[in-house]
Amino acid sequence: MNIYSRPVVFAIVAAVVVLIGTVVTTFIPMMLPTTQPVSKYVKPYTAIELEGRDIYIREGCNNCHTQTVRPLVTEVARYGEYSKPEEFAYDRPFLWGSRRTGPDLARVGGKYPDSWHYQHTVNPQSMFARSNMPPFRWLAERKLDTSWSYRKVSVLGYGYSREEVEKQIKEFRAKVTSPDYPAKRIRDQVTPPPLRGDITELDALVAYLQKLGRDLKELRKKETAGVAAAAEVPRSNPYSGNREAAEKGKEIFEKNCQVCHGKEGGGGIGPNLRDEKWIYGSKDSDLYESISRGRKGGMPPFGNRLSSEDIWKVITYIRTLGEE
Amino acid sequence: MKSPTPGESVAKGFAFSSIFWLIIGLVVGLYLALEMFLPQLNFAPWIAFGRLRVVHTNGLAFGFGLGGIFACSYYMLEKLTRKELVFPKLAKFHLYLFNVAILLAAISLFAGMNTSKEYAELEWPLDVVVVIMWVIFAVNVFATLIKRREKQMYISLWYILAMTVTVAILYIVNNLEVPVNLFKSYSAYAGVNDANVQWWYGHNAVGFVFTVPILAMFYYFFPKSIGIPIYSHRLSIVSFWSLVFAYLWTGAHHLMLTPLPEWIQTVGLAFSIFLIAPSWGSVINGYYTLRGNWDKMRTNYLTKFFILGITFYGLQTIQGPTQALRSLTSFFHYTDWVVGHVHMGTMGWVTMTIMASFYYLIPKLAGRELYSEKLANQSFWLVLIGQLLYTVTMWIAGIMQGAMWKATNPDGSLTYSFVNVVAAMYPYWKIRFVGGVVYLAGILVFLYNMVKTASSGSQAA
């Protein structure tokens, strides 16, 4: 029998041949526990975070941003702990991406305050002049459509009741429209007045970005809570008044701090560092604590990115700012 | 001139539809290339990079690529079976449905309706349309093959059959999703599984749309244009079966060093390296077909399209597997290097071969001589130079990006912030745009030649 003169037989043989690799590498793994691990520390998205995720998909953010940190030294240094399979248990679809025109976002949650994202998403070039990210102004000008939210979380099987979804939306609205919302000033700047009392698409997107990688970070925080508390914070600056250290501190400041605190600490998203006002105390050890561990109002922790010497050098530089 | 067969007339329709979507796709590509260094061009939602890139990839892969594949498949099907299409009206309907589907696809992607899975972005109602369209095509393929007058099926028909069967499996499995409403759905798979299914699909979309049917064209139109039969039938049998067997194992090389189980990555890597063999089986078959007749590179203008096309296929199939190696993937993945790699395959191999097939096909369909061989030669050089400028620039940019991302200071801290690396890329992104302009110029010359041939070339003897 010659299959080259029997098209139907040929097609069946071809189908069998292509299905062998398919079954082994794709169908069998579907049933294995290693491709669908679950873990208690990974929480599903809230209805609002999911809406933000859908906006992320709609705008095609995944075309430029990946969401998986590889186990490579420089990648962990740049983005944080490498990605674990269980972190994606609730991701339908997955959003790992294939190109990093912009940075990876798997660990962006909690890295910056909400205000950072409001300003950056709407006008990236105002924070990084050479960035090529599109300014997504329209997200702040659109009210979030929540009419499908319940259906969405039900399709995904997140297990929220209709009342829970409504409560999540209501609480989120209360949070972002509250006069005490830490990002209020920047949010009001980018949001048109009629929408300030409502949830915009940008609000939901920011909520989603803040969720990325957050579960693992919280877990690590819990694990190391005792250790961190025990670690002693040095009380005074070993470089106090050292001109060379201040120079180095200036470099570090420009790379890490200037985006929020402005050029020479003039203020921006973060408070002015040139004046006499210190929200969390004016002692060297207070500043060290703010930089190393972060503060609730939005200051991200830099303890894992900057060495203790570098933090002191930045403080040395900051002390020179109010001088002239 | 005798009246055209049903296969010929539908092939003509698909050929010109395909060129139309090619121009649209390339213009969108040029705009994207500009946005890479002029972010202010993202002034409205529908034109922002994230949405537009998907229009570019889908428009070219499916509007241009599939259009060309359908044109050549219908033509080859009739010639190689010596039988007219069994269902001519169905084929005609296929042509209309195809163009409507591509138009709706473009509109929906502009509107942001998109599943995010690469090359499978269309939302579920359009997935249904695609499946219906595929069945319509398959009906004619099988019916005509069953009623054929030629006993043996030639190599090209194997490749068309393999595509027909495999694309159906790939498309349906990867697009399984649960609708939320008419415009939105969620994937049936979650996380790691979704990634695995997607890149099994994604890589084999490359395999069974950008490789298998293009090889079908190569095996038919190349020997036809030079009047020499293919070098080895046995080599083509071996490379066909080993290619279609090995391809399906390799998707995981897109997911190296991700949370995908390591054994799947390693299997994908091993089969990727193996794939060099069957790929080069076809390359060698092409080169040896010309043995003793290499002067045809000079005397027959189409020879150089096919030979350069298959050469880029050969380079592509060495570069691809090496990129999968763990040491190299850790450096190159996510950089512009991979963008260069993709574009060598699409601009070099796929487009060059489809162009060559059309240069052969369209004069035949129009019953006229080619309008201008000189213009055909000019289109060759413009397309070649544009492509090389594009891909080589992207490789250099990729090496720089990879190196800057990995650079560390003596104390172990990173040398460059992310935006430092972006800023270093601007010169390369500008040169890439120039490459794209040269390439589009070549394609416009090609379009002009084809339109002139169809409308006013001299009657064939």
Image (cartoon, coloured by chain):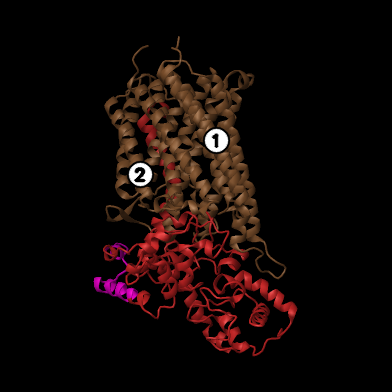
Chain colours: A red, B brown
B256 or A32: nearer the viewer:
B256
**Mark 1 belongs to chain:** B
In the image, is A319 to the left or to the right of A149?
right
Question: Is residue A197 in view from this perspective?
Answer: yes
Where does the image place residue B370, in percent across and percent down from the top left?
49, 18
The residue at the far top in this view is B461
Give the x, y percent position of residue B80.
Answer: 41, 22
Label 2 element class: helix
Q: Residue at image x 56%, y 43%? A: B433
On screen, residue B350 above or below A283 = above
Which residues make up the magenta segment? A151-173
Query: In the rendered structure, which amino acid carries the disc numbered 2?
Result: Ala
Q: Amino acid at mark 1?
A: Tyr
- Asked if A274 appears above or below A44 in the picture, the reply is below
Q: Nearer the viewer, mark 1 or mark 2?
A: 1
Whether labels 1 and 2 share one chain: yes
Residue B235, image x and y in percent?
Answer: 55, 29
Give me the chain letter of mark 2. Answer: B
Residue at the (59%, 73%) spot, across then down: A257
The answer to if A158 sits in the magenta stretch is yes
- Crowding near pointer 1: few (<14 within 10 Å), some, many (20+)? many
| Residue B275 lies within the magenta run | no
Mark before the other along the chain sequence, 1 or 2: 2
